[in-house]
């Protein structure tokens, strides 16, 4: 089913943070923060990243540059509403700050976004969470400058307007979305990703691929009804600028992703994957993502006992399951792209060619992208379907219900999506190979 607006949109928007990229870029943070007028900074990280010593090194350097640093190192991997509230309460008690500095993966960066939002705006966390889960309130005040320093390669959170969280009581992942959440500056230093374990590199790398693939196949911005300036949202649909970032991200991943997982010390591969993560973030942060991400949120929210290697449980949570975000996104992506193929066949074929240059095209073009993607998943050690992470056919109804709550994401799909469509994708994803 295609979209045929009466008055097609003729305008697309594009937003991005300032960007500093390259080995050693973290050593210039004192200068960067001084340019933002920062004298007292909240550094947000998590225990795992703190254990690498990188946040302490950065805090020490900033101290020598005359910037006072307060550290919050309890960000939760895959944040929950409770973990974000804990971070906000810590920040409010330690305020005031001139800026917020996030050092870590998407979980730390998203935690920093929530903290920044609630340091500068009144109300509580759920007031701002996307509808229908939360109140979908827009921040009325500008946020403090946020500098994001990613230590993983995948989420693209350093580029985007999104903060993702798990609302535990509803067993669903959702988010907060507003242009004011976009970081002011992204400092991407590939040296910080060398310590990223193979399993984390694999899962977060699938997030890169799905960001680029979903954005590239998203419904075009011209397929929406024309909007006023105050009605436009960050996810505006595929557009010529976002397409360029997605194409380049896919090309970089085609050459380097498997190498980065296989050999974490391969500096050239790490550089390419870090760049691909940033490029994909610059793409999907404007075009949007769709069905695989919508499915990923209830998958992550409803997991029971599964927990992959390289993702140790926090203290006191040994029995708490975890499907990392990038893994959760990938598990239904092949079947989701099979479903969306008819809306944009040429785009799906082109995406497969970028991801697997020189690969033989199957007789049925609809199988090309799903086949290429499952080959990558198998090669980097992603589980072979939802069944491998503990779900059965009996779970499909609940998962589909959770996915349908992701209205903001499903609105970007190139075909209108029903609960029956989602259930079919989930059923076919129980066993991918």
Image: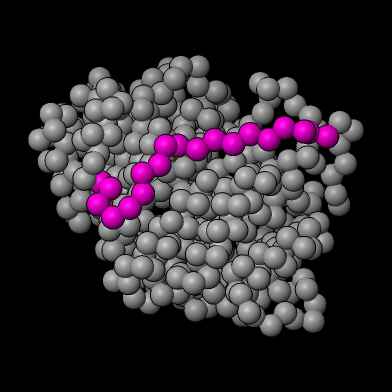
**Residue at 34% of width from left, 36% of height from top?**
147
- In which image quadrant can residue 350 be found? bottom right
Asked if residue 365 lies in the magenta stretch, the reply is no
Question: Along the horizontal axis of the image, is 249 left or right of 365?
Answer: left
The chosen color scheme is: one colour
In the depicted structure, whether residue 284 falls above or below residue 426 = above
**Residues shaded magenta:** 8-26
Q: Where is 27 relative to 264, above or below?
A: above
**Residue at figure coordinates x 73%, y 74% from the top left:** 367
Image coordinates for residue 288, horizontal then vertical, percent:
62, 45
Q: Residue 386 appears at what percent x and percent y?
A: 58, 68
| Rendered location of residue 80, percent (x, y) | 42, 43
Q: Quadrant of residue 14?
A: top right
Q: Is residue 122 visible?
A: yes
Residue located farthest toward the left when viewing the structure as drawn = 64
Residue 415's place in the image compared with 307, above or below, is: above
Above or below — where is 73 with respect to 248? above
Q: Is residue 130 left or right of residue 55?
A: right
Percent position of residue 213, x then y: 62, 59
Q: Residue at x 27, y 63 (%)?
A: 195
């Amino acid at each position: 089913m295609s979209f045929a607006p009466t008055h097609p949109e003729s305008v697309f928007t594009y937003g991005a943070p300032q960007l500093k990229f390259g080995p050693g870029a973290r050593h210039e943070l004192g200068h960067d923060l001084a340019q933002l007028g920062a004298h007292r900074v909240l550094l947000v990280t998590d225990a795992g990243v703190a254990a690498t010593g990188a946040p302490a090194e950065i805090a020490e350097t900033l101290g020598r540059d005359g910037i006072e640093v307060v550290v919050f190192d309890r960000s939760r991997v895959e944040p929950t509403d409770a973990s974000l509230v804990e971070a906000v309460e810590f920040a409010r008690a330690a305020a005031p700050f001139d800026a917020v500095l996030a050092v870590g993966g998407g979980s730390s960066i998203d935690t920093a976004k929530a903290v920044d939002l609630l340091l500068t705006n009144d109300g509580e966390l759920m007031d701002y969470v996307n509808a229908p889960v939360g109140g979908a309130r827009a921040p009325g005040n500008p946020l403090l400058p946020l500098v994001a320093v990613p230590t993983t390669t995948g989420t693209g959170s350093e580029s985007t307007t999104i903060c993702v969280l798990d609302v535990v009581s509803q067993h669903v992942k959702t988010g907060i979305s507003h242009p004011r959440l976009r970081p002011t500056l992204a400092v991407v230093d590939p040296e910080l990703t060398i310590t990223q374990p193979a399993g984390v590199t694999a899962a977060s790398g699938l997030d890169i691929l799905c960001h680029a693939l979903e954005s590239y196949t998203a419904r075009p911005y011209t397929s929406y009804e024309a909007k006023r300036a105050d009605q436009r949202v960050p996810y505006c649909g595929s557009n010529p600028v976002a397409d360029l970032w997605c194409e380049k991200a896919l090309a970089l991943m085609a050459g380097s992703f498997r190498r980065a997982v296989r050999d974490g010390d391969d500096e050239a591969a790490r550089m390419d994957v870090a760049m691909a993560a940033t490029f994909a973030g610059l793409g999907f942060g404007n075009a949007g993502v769709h069905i695989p991400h919508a499915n990923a949120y209830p998958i992550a929210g409803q997991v029971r006992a599964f927990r992959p290697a390289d993702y140790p449980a926090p203290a006191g949570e040994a029995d708490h399951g975890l499907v990392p975000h990038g893994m959760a996104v990938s598990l239904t992506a092949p079947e989701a792209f099979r479903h969306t193929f008819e809306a944009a066949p040429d785009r799906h074929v082109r995406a497969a060619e970028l991801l697997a240059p020189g690969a033989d095209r199957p007789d049925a073009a609809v199988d090309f992208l799903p086949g290429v993607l499952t080959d990558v998943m198998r090669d980097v050690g992603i589980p072979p379907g939802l069944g491998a992470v503990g779900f059965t056919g009996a779970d499909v109804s609940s998962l589909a219900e959770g996915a349908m709550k992701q209205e903001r994401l499903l609105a970007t799909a190139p075909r209108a999506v029903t609960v029956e469509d989602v259930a079919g994708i989930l059923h076919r994803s129980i066993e991918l190979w």
